[in-house]
Image (cartoon, coloured by chain):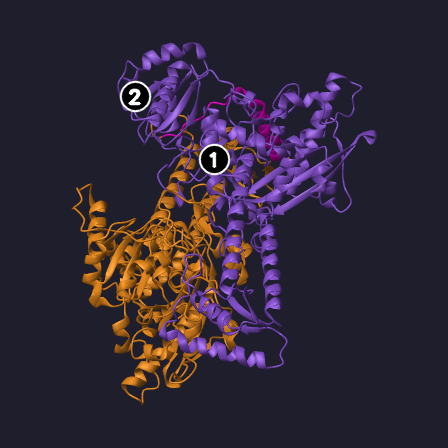
Chain colours: A orange, B purple
């Protein structure tokens, strides 16, 4: 925690059990920021953040360098007692396969992963614990058998349990008469039996202390120990209760790191960090609001100052020198001219990633790389302003334009989500929403729009997509023409589609008569891979087996691959070795 | 597979990523068989079977012994290529925690787990592969550029990719001119680029063979190799395609074991195997029918002869000697009088579990134990019929009464699901369906029914439950009386509730006026643990975080614990050390 307190900024990165549940739809080219948020929200609610990388950077100004302290946390919500939430989470087999190929240690995750609780969960569990302690107090007090409403109910002992209880009492009597100083262990029995034992022993043996413990194999057993007198017993009980409170405190676990980051108000840097932020809020702070505006407010209370290095790399003047902005490619590009790599040394005891020894896709290493890229780019911006500036601190005003703007992948004309205010609005006059038969392939759509030049297709489902014209000037003619023919498909303007969709969402309002057009066109029946619709979105219920998301292959098309760039990674950012996988938004207009 | 062919019977057991998704509701005391099936169906669709234990038993009749061959399969649906299903599956953190505590190796699961495909998936993937091969054939043929509908579409090369392609072509030219016999590796690039490379190379270099390969870190790259002439290239392509077909065949993987069991028609033994059977059908054969009758038919085509050892242990004459029928407790009981443990030796190379060296909750070991228990119980039945019978083969008529009957946990009066015909119907005249305020605890319900003697409560949601009277003879009076008062709760007969529920399910029929009663009763406000409603069923959508299912604790009640017995295990059977956890249905009437 002191590392957070004493740093100048920190970088973060997460790894997840999956990215795309198929429920919320895939990220698409013409998503509005609110649509994109909702797609990520679905994923964050279903999947789990299982590794959190954090790297603190402390400037040594006179030496023009940073001291880095990278941390790599395995995160797993172990249900530590019966009150703790027993979470259900989704896994995507391609993500799991990807992580295991990168050396992710799942046994370590499940055995040693740090647990966490949101503030709300913590409060609730504390109340439960207090209630339990209160009850034990009442049960132990001599007037516990009175019948007023505030006392504890004594369960009548069923016939078939009497011999069992007598046997236990006999063993306790022998134990108390004997010399054994060790506690007497009662073999595991069920919860009801434990309750019966508890109330019987409390009544019959005022001087023994009873405790339920959990064994290594998760079995629950009771331990009986001798006490000198009522006071000694009370003391033992108090010790046990203090221990339980400590245990609960421990279970807040990783959430404390997030709380410390919040408290510090430090600058938090991430690469393509929108998904990370959504997961962090959901898992360690509170459930995600449905509305984007609510989310923006929430983020600012938890992570008040954010910078996305992918946005920096995609903004002039840096953008001019960056061909591909995936983290790995950015790291490599920033090593050469015109950049000067920032000097970053790891603190003693943190030299895991020196000499490039880190492994990509380990969250701690990725956080280290992200923070280093940030420093290099910041120094570059400083030198661009004043060539004698060789070291620019993160408190520089040069950082301000990037504060609280999260990179929006694959949205050509809205490069970022603006947490500090309203979002940019892209022109969508040249974009159409097309509904077509299930059998249609990409080539059918290309044929349909052929008279209007090259188009960009952004799949929504297996029967709908957006089509954007490159020649924006022919948009009006195209819409007019496509509405004068009839056929198996259905073309409307982007604006009309959105207006309609919002109406459908807001209420069962009667729909305005659409300015649509039924287009007739010969169905081309070639079924090449390049034509396969890449996205089959299932919105109903919970699909255990989603339709295959096509991955890169020699005969898959550009658009589908750019849409799917995240599908093989598990951190939401295409940091892999694929050239062009991670093209910047400015460039993606080209095709 | 020959082990299956040559055995007299085989035993199976599964481990799962979770048991209770909260979606379908928890198993309850008065479920009908169809209700229970649907609850299990939800779980099987969400969670994954990740370990399959199988143990074949071959009788050596003259030596009165069996030779056992236990197998332990880790099962994981690796998405082996872009056509393969990328499955999403749910995990329950308590189940994962339980498995890891038993020594389950998740790294091995994800790294080495065997994949599987249902027959339908296999057929689909075969068709995809054929289509791809067909396309390559067309692309390679000289007339691939003609414009008729059956040919492959050539993608125009975008401006920004031209220099990239030229560079690749140059490298290939150099490679062809050089002496290097090894294939030329083109660094990983995106799918669109690979497609461009493919079509360009095919056209420009008729004598090279191109292949896309997947690297260790799941990156996709192309490999270019020299061929002597068109024939040689064709041969290389055919070799590659044959390999791809083999690969697909390999991916059918574990499903082949199930298919071999089906084909053998051998007797399959399991302990409390209903959940295992539901998972096996869903994962390796086909999706689960909504109707129980459809499921029964399906099971018989996949696993034609089943015996459930938990049902055997819960049926006279064996039942008289079995106090607790969890697998572990059954195993221990069957070691002593009046039973004679069957002699089972493991075959050479299969002696993992000799000398009790197995670890409980490893599926292979549990299958071994289950099969051994079956042999012991069968011998006991044989001796009970004729005391000189020391060895009874599984083909004995003594097995017949148990064939295709699956034990139904916690249903007092319907001990088994009958796959061979209609199910038993229990009398429910003494059972009421109660709807009550959310704040109500168990004690409130006990108070409500106090005038009618002891009751058994079976929670459905946090505001509904079934209440069964022990004094069946007062049922009529109770219903009449409870309907003459008014208050916050709502009591109807079991029959009325079911009739209503089915109506609600079948159509939006107007409901008959209920013969209900509004009961007034003082709200008792003690909030002891024993009173906490143990089941809060959320039916809406997909809960990532279900309400905590109370586990055994000293102050939880008998009923809730018996309802939850499976919640800490991951094989659906309470095989653990909890005394009474796994009480037989005959006994559960007692409380």
Q: Nearer the viewer, residue A463 or A521?
A: A521
Quadrant where the N terminus of chain A sits is: bottom left
The reply to whether the magenta stretch includes residue A160 is yes
Query: Which residue is pictured at 49% across the width and 71% down the height?
Result: B203
Residue labelled with disc 1: B41
Relative vertical location of residue A233 with respect to residue A431 in this rendering, above or below: above
Does the segment drawn in magenta span residue B318?
A: no
Q: Which residues are magenta?
A: A151-177
In the rendered image, which residue does mark 2 sit on?
Answer: B521
Instruction: State whether residue B111 is above or below residue B168.
Output: above
Name which residue lies at 33% across and 27% down: A149
Q: Chain of mark 2?
A: B
Compared to B343, does A21 lie above or below? below
Q: Nearer the viewer, residue A118 or A34?
A: A34
Residue B507, horizontal then vertical, whole percent: 32, 26
Q: Earlier in the sequence, mark 2 or mark 1?
A: 1
- Most extreme residue toward the right is B62
């Amino acid at each position: 925690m002191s590392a957070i307190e004493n740093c100048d900024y920190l970088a973060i990165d997460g790894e997840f059990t999956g990215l795309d549940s198929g429920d919320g739809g895939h990220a698409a080219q013409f998503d509005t920021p609110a649509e994109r948020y909702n797609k990520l929200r679905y994923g964050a609610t279903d999947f789990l953040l299982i590794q959190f990388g954090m790297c603190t950077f402390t400037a040594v100004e006179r030496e023009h360098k940073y001291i880095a302290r990278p941390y790599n946390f395995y995160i797993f919500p172990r249900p530590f007692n019966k009150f703790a939430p027993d979470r259900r989470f989704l896994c995507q087999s391609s993500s799991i396969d990807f992580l295991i190929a990168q050396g992710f240690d799942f046994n370590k995750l499940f055995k040693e992963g740090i647990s966490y609780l949101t503030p709300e969960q913590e409060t609730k569990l504390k109340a439960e614990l207090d209630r339990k302690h209160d009850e034990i107090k009442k049960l132990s007090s001599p007037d516990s058998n009175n019948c007023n409403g505030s006392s504890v109910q004594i369960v009548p002992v069923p016939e078939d349990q009497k011999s069992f209880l007598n046997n236990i009492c006999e063993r306790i009597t022998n134990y108390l008469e004997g010399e054994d100083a060790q506690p007497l262990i009662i073999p595991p029995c069920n919860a009801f039996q434990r309750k019966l034992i508890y109330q019987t022993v409390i009544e019959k043996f005022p001087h023994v202390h009873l405790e339920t413990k959990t064994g290594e194999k998760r079995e629950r057993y009771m331990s009986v120990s001798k006490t000198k007198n009522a006071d000694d017993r009370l003391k033992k009980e108090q010790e046990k209760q203090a221990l339980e409170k400590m245990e609960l405190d421990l279970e807040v676990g990783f959430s404390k790191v997030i709380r410390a980051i919040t408290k510090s108000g430090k600058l938090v840097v991430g690469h393509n960090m929108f998904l990370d932020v959504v997961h962090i809020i959901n898992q360690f702070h509170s459930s995600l609001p449905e509305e984007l505006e609510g989310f923006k407010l929430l983020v600012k209370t938890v992570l008040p100052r954010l910078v996305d290095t992918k946005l920096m790399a995609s903004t002039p003047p840096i953008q001019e020198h960056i061909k591909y902005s995936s983290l790995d490619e950015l790291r490599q590009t920033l090593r050469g001219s015109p950049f000067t790599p920032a000097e970053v040394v790891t603190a003693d005891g943190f030299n895991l990633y020196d000499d490039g020894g880190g492994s990509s896709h380990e969250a701690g290493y990725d956080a280290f790389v992200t923070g280093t890229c940030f420093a290099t780019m910041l120094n570059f911006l400083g030198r661009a302003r004043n060539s004698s500036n060789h070291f620019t601190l993160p408190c520089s005003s040069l950082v301000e334009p990037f504060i609280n703007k999260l990179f929006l992948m694959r949205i050509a004309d809205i490069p970022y989500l603006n947490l500090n205010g309203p979002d940019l609005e892209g022109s969508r006059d040249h974009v159409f929403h097309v509904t077509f038969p299930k059998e249609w392939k990409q080539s059918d759509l290309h044929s349909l729009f052929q008279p209007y030049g090259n188009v960009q297709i952004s799949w929504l489902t297996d029967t709908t997509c957006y089509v954007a014209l490159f020649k924006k000037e022919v948009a009006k003619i195209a819409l007019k023409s496509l509405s004068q023919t009839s056929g198996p498909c259905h073309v409307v303007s982007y604006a009309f589609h959105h207006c309609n969709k919002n109406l459908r969402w807001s209420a069962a309002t009667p729909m305005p008569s659409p300015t649509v057009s039924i287009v007739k066109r010969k169905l081309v029946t070639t079924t090449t891979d390049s034509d396969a619709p890449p996205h089959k979105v299932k919105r109903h219920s919970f699909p255990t087996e989603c339709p295959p998301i096509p991955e890169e292959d020699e005969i898959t098309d550009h658009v589908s691959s750019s849409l799917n760039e995240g599908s093989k990674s598990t951190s939401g950012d295409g940091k892999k070795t694929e050239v062009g996988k991670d093209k910047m938004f400015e460039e993606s207009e080209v095709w």
